[in-house]
Image (cartoon, rainbow, N blue to C red):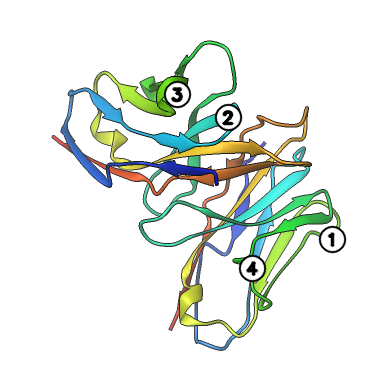
Amino acid sequence: DTGVSQDPRHKITKRGQNVTFRCDPISEHNRLYWYRQTLGQGPEFLTYFQNEAQLEKSRLLSDRFSAERPKGSFSTLEIQRTEQGDSAMYLCASSPSIGMANQPQHFGDGTRLSIL
Amino acid sequence: AQSVTQPDIHITVSEGASLELRCNYSYGATPYLFWYVQSPGQGLQLLLKYFSGDTLVQGIKGFEAEFKRSQSSFNLRKPSVHWSDAAEYFCAVGILKTSYDKVIFGPGTSLSVIP
């Protein structure tokens, strides 16, 4: 168990470019979450996967955002036509689905996105 | 609507002093409650969790928290703070939805430790 891994750790890009982030969850975890965290705030929920199925998306996830988890293992989060307001830390978390509730989410170290 | 408030944006304590970080939640049912810690540039690490049973829960790094249903609070405590405890602390409430647990985080409390 090496924990949740995110790549890259930092991404700097110009406004209007597309970016893609990757998350590798803990191997036996079939639940995967994406969050966005801006400076001085707690993480805000973006989307949730149960295996390969994307079961919920926040209204924060505009049409420029898309997330996939094609084989139920790693996940990618893509932002198209980036805007200044997209600058944030993007966190990935995973948890097992033993039982229904009360399984804590394990977080990766995040990808910090800076839009020039 | 469900929410979490952390009244203190920033707290400064001296090393060796005791610490209490406040957390209040709003949720109609029995909540699942968490405290996470985040060091600069890092992800969140789980300190402790409350699901049911004993309202005083012990966590890692010498932290504990007490669930008080009557006050809708889940305050985090540590009897003696170490310089390495300087970080951002997030209280969170877990809400059981149809297929997963939605976690709502508070805005965080930044802790500084004076040597």
Amino acid type of disc 2?
Tyr
Sequence-first disc among 1 and 4: 4
Q: State whether residue B87 appears in this view.
A: yes
Gap in angstroms between the C-alphas marked 4 and 3: 34 Å
**Chain of the residue displaying label 3:** B
At mark 1, the secondary structure is loop
**Comparing labels 3 and 2, the label whose residue is closer to the camera:** 2
Callout 4 crowding tier (Cα within 10 Å): few <14, some 14–19, many ≥20: some
Would you name the residue on which mark 4 appears?
A61
Q: Which residue is mark 1?
A: A70
Q: Nearer the viewer, residue A50 or A7?
A: A50
Question: Is disc 4 on the same chain as disc 1?
Answer: yes
Provide the residue designation for mark 3.
B60
Query: Marks 4/2: CA distance?
Result: 25 Å
Give the spatial CA distance, label 1 vs label 4. Answer: 19 Å
Q: In the rendered view of the protein, which quadrant contains the N terminus of chain A?
A: top right
Judge whether B19 appears above or below B111 on screen. Answer: above
Q: Do marks 1 and 3 both belong to one polypeptide chain?
A: no
**Closer to the eye: label 2 or 1:** 2
Residue denoted by label 2: B32
| Position of residue B36 measured from the top left corner of the image (x, y, whole percent) | 46, 37
